[in-house]
Image (cartoon, helix red, strand yellow):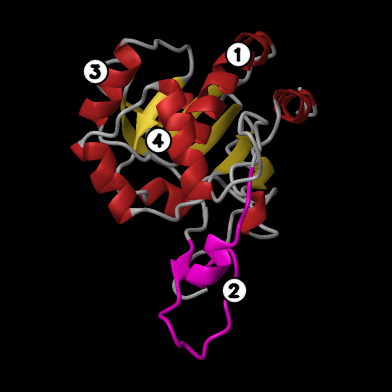
Amino acid sequence: MGDQKRPLQPGETAPAFALATANFDGTVSFADLSGRPFVIGFFRGLHCPFCRRQVEQLAGIQPTLRASGVETVAVINTPVERARLYFRHRPTPVTLLCDPDCHTHRAYGVPHAEFLPDGSSKQPEWPYSATMAQFQAARINPTGELPELLQPMEANTILNAKDRFELDEADMAIFSNHPTQLVGHFLVNANGTIVWSQIEALDGPNSLCIFPSAAEIIAAAGSLER
């Protein structure tokens, strides 16, 4: 596990943050959301087609969540200038925050796997460490869009081509610096306490890119005490 922090659990206090927004100029902080419950998702950068799809799903349920008093926030691992350009052409009601260094991902304990060197005597400890062979053997098709189960990097390539999404220099730099960042979702109540969480692929790399469904998120929000 190294120096990685475990994912925060229900009952723990959500860490504060202040991040630049992709929706408009300025920042949004934890204090700005104070007194209101919110769902917050921590994602890889725009280079991840599955993360882009999950942000779209959050946008689809945002009216339902807001009607019940719950705000919707997404933190993407993309520089703000790149994110603003992308979402200028794809507006969304979700509050989009940018954290190219994954500081808030770390604060909430969302894991990032580290590859063990070839020949290492250490045992892999997923989701914190893995062998390259373990990752290369993974096969996924979480959205049903692929012709068959595919290796995650191949799946990304196919879906980016389908979306006509071309990685620019900023995307490639983020992918290079944070290639194994996982995704986490948290529900924070009006008192700033985490009441629900879900972390990607805790049971192994074959579960990569499987995120909570719209129904699961709405159900979690519906369980909040009013």
Mark 4 is surrounded, within 10 Å at the Cα level, by few (under 14), some (14 to 19) or many (20 or more) other residues, namely many
Q: Specify which label sits upstream in the sequence, 1 or 4.
A: 1
Dots 1, 3 in contact, CB < 8 A: no
Q: Residue at x 54, y 23 (%)?
A: 72
Instruction: Relative to 164, say whether 203 is above or below.
Output: below
- Judging by the rendered image, the residue that carries numbered circle 2 is 125
User: In front of the other: label 4 or label 2?
Assistant: 2
Q: Specify which label sits upstream in the sequence, 1 or 3.
A: 3
Name the one closer to the observer, 226 or 80: 80
- Judging by the rendered image, the residue that carries numbered circle 1 is 60
| Prevailing secondary structure class for the magenta stretch in the rendered image | loop
Q: Specify which label sits upstream in the sequence, 2 or 1.
A: 1
Name the one closer to the observer, 155 or 172: 155
CA gap, disc 2 to disc 1?
A: 35 Å
- Judging by the rendered image, the residue that carries numbered circle 3 is 25
Specify whether residue 30 is in view: no
Q: Name the amino acid type tagged 2.
A: Glu
Q: Specify which label sits upstream in the sequence, 3 or 4.
A: 3
Q: Specify which label sits upstream in the sequence, 2 or 3.
A: 3
Q: Position of residue 119 (x, y in %)?
A: 45, 88
* Picture quarter with the C terminus: top right
Which of the 4 image quadrants contains residue 58? top right
- Judging by the rendered image, the residue that carries numbered circle 4 is 76
Q: Relative to residue 106, is residue 173 drawn left or right?
A: left
Q: Secondary structure at mark 4?
A: strand
